[in-house]
Image (tube, rainbow, N blue to C red):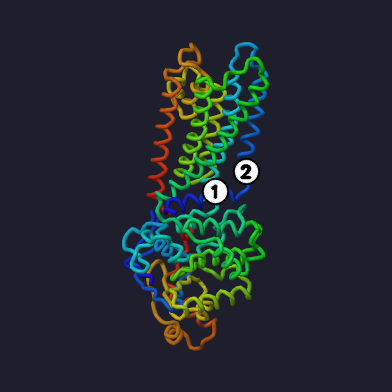
């Protein structure tokens, strides 16, 4: 096995060997399913006729737990002191960082895919006649985009935690921002020009939470342009995390 | 062999390691002595590449630690025994370390057995006593069957039986031809274990000599108490109490 493969395998063992991994990811599944189910009962009433919006609502609340997971995985290395053992075992900072991010990405990516499919199936069952065609491109695009959004946003958060070398600070900043945007911060006229480009916001178009032309909630970018902006955010955070990892003493 | 050459580490607040040079030879236990805050732990972190030196270099077998492939198979280290995830079992801690360096799963069971942790292998780190955490740290250091061992204050928290155990273990490892560097702030303990001493204070080298020579030159009798006094005299000018700790 390559040196990177060994480092990544070690990170995977670390994830699997603490209970908080299973607990946090199960909480994500439960929250996304519960909120998705609650929202699906409103589909067909009022303005809401797209069951995929109910799926997105569940996932967007559930993402708070994925962010918590990603930040905790990194932050616990620093709070427990295992970072010293980790870097003694894998002295290449770049290799260690890449292995850590790969493990976070893989765990979140796997959980996100399984959960979003389950929530989608649940919502489809609840809405009955209003169910969407699951082979339609708009459905596949939404599910694919949601998966990319959840996975990249978690890697983004994990990179921020590397820069902060802590669990508390990244969560104290990221969770309120993510929670407020769920409450519509990105739609407030005064801050929208800037906030709509925040990493948690740019996935909203592909997740059917808004459409480009909408007078109030509309965005000046399309679904995949939004994902491209998220890729840029994630790349920037990864670069920052890598630089921070390389430069600083542990 | 460990070579430290003109190693210097400056922090914003001051200097932790100051132009330090010494060599640790294989086949004997070398005690790395100094009062708390003398720079022992910083020196060890510099040797392991965890901290970056301001100047100078450290090499193990002629190479900087960071350039050693599968470093756990060359150098075993015990840093702080508490550096464990509280929710991870002793066995899982060793398993991830083993994976990271391509060490087989069977070796994990061997070191658990060798350190007396086999029965506690499934216990989470938070349920381990300090003495058991030290044993787990030793198990981690032995995992890759390395030729060089660097142990930072390994007797901390051990009961008398554990102290004797680790003393004999270090002597045996050195007798097998390995390089063993053991830091301590307890002169009396080192007098029983180490054949050679490297003494530092305020980050500077104070003495680098065989333990017997140290005893002959600094103390009238061989009792631990007077050795401790000799050590205190040697380091008295070099003790610095820092409010911010030694980090």
Depicted A181 relative to depicted A189: above or below? below
Question: Dot 2: within a 10 Å radius of its alpha carbon, few (fewer than 14), some, or many (20 or more) residues?
Answer: some
Q: Quadrant of residue A44?
A: top right
Q: Is residue B228 among what the camera can see?
A: no
Helix, strand or loop for disc 2 = helix
- Tally of numbered tags: 2
Depicted A79 relative to depicted B224: above or below? above
Query: Residue at position x 55%, y 51% from top?
Result: A14
Q: Position of residue B116 (x, y in %)?
A: 62, 69
Query: Residue at position x 46%, y 30% from top?
Result: A199
Q: Chain of mark 2?
A: A
Foreground disc of the pair 1, 2: 2
Depicted B82 relative to depicted A184: above or below? below
**Which residue occupies the foreground of this view, A187 or B98?**
B98
Depicted A94 relative to depicted B109: above or below? above
Query: Residue at position x 56%, y 29% from top?
Result: A179
State the quadrant of the N terminus of chain A: bottom left
Q: Position of residue A22 (x, y in %)?
A: 62, 43
Task: Determine which residue is flagged by label 2.
Answer: A22
Kindly report the distance in space between the C-alpha atoms of the residues bearing marks 1 and 2: 16 Å
State the quadrant of the C terminus of chain A: bottom left
Left or right, residue A215 beside residue A115: left
Q: Position of residue A241 (x, y in %)?
A: 42, 43
Sequence order check: which comes first, mark 1 or mark 2?
A: 2
Q: Chain of mark 1?
A: A
Task: Determine which residue is flagged by label 1.
Answer: A76
**Which residue occupies the foreground of this view, B100 or A85?**
B100
Q: Quadrant of residue B198?
A: bottom left
């Amino acid at each position: 096995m390559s040196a990177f493969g060994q480092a990544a395998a070690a990170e995977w063992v670390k994830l699997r060997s603490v209970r908080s991994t299973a607990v946090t990811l199960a909480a994500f599944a439960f929250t996304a399913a519960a909120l998705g189910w609650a929202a699906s009962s409103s589909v067909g009433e009022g303005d809401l006729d797209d069951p995929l919006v109910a799926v997105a609502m569940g996932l967007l609340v559930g993402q708070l737990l994925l962010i918590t997971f990603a930040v905790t995985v990194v932050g616990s290395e620093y709070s427990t002191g295992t970072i010293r053992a980790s870097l003694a075992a894998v002295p290449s900072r770049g290799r260690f960082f890449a292995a850590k991010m790969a493990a976070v990405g893989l765990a979140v990516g796997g959980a996100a895919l399984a959960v979003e499919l389950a929530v989608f199936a649940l919502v489809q069952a609840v809405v009955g006649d209003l169910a969407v065609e699951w082979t339609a491109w708009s459905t596949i695009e939404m599910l694919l985009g949601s998966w990319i959004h959840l996975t990249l946003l978690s890697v983004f958060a994990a990179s921020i935690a590397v820069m902060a070398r802590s669990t508390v600070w990244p969560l104290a900043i990221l969770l309120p921002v993510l929670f407020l945007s769920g409450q519509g911060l990105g739609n407030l006229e005064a801050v929208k020009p800037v906030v709509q480009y925040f990493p948690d916001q740019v996935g909203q178009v592909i997740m059917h939470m808004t459409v480009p032309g909408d007078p109030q909630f509309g965005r000046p970018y399309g679904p995949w342009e939004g994902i491209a902006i998220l890729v840029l955010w994630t790349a920037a955070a990864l670069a920052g995390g890598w630089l921070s990892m390389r430069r600083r003493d542990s | 062999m460990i070579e430290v050459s003109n190693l210097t580490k400056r922090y914003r607040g001051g200097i932790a390691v100051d132009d330090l040079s010494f060599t640790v030879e294989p086949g004997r236990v070398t005690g790395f002595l100094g009062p708390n805050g003398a720079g022992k732990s910083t020196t060890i972190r510099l040797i392991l590449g965890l901290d970056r030196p301001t100047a100078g270099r450290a090499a193990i077998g002629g190479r900087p630690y960071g350039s050693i492939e599968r470093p756990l198979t060359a150098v075993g280290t015990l840093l702080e025994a508490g550096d464990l995830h509280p929710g991870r079992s002793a066995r899982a801690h060793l398993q991830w370390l083993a994976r990271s360096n391509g060490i087989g799963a069977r070796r994990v069971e061997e070191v658990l057995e060798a350190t007396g942790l086999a029965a506690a292998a499934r216990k989470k780190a938070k349920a381990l006593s300090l003495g058991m955490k030290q044993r787990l740290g030793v198990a981690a250091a032995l995992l890759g069957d390395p030729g060089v061992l660097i142990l930072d204050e390994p007797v901390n928290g051990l009961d008398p039986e554990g102290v004797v155990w680790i003393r004999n273990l270090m002597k045996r490892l050195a007798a097998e031809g390995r390089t063993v560097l053991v830091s301590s702030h307890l002169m009396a303990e080192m007098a029983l274990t180490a054949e050679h001493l490297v003494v530092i204070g305020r980050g500077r080298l104070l003495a680098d000599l065989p333990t017997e020579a140290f005893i002959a030159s600094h103390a009238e009798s061989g009792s631990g108490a007077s050795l401790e006094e000799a050590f205190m005299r040697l380091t008295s000018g070099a003790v610095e109490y820092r409010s911010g700790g030694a980090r």
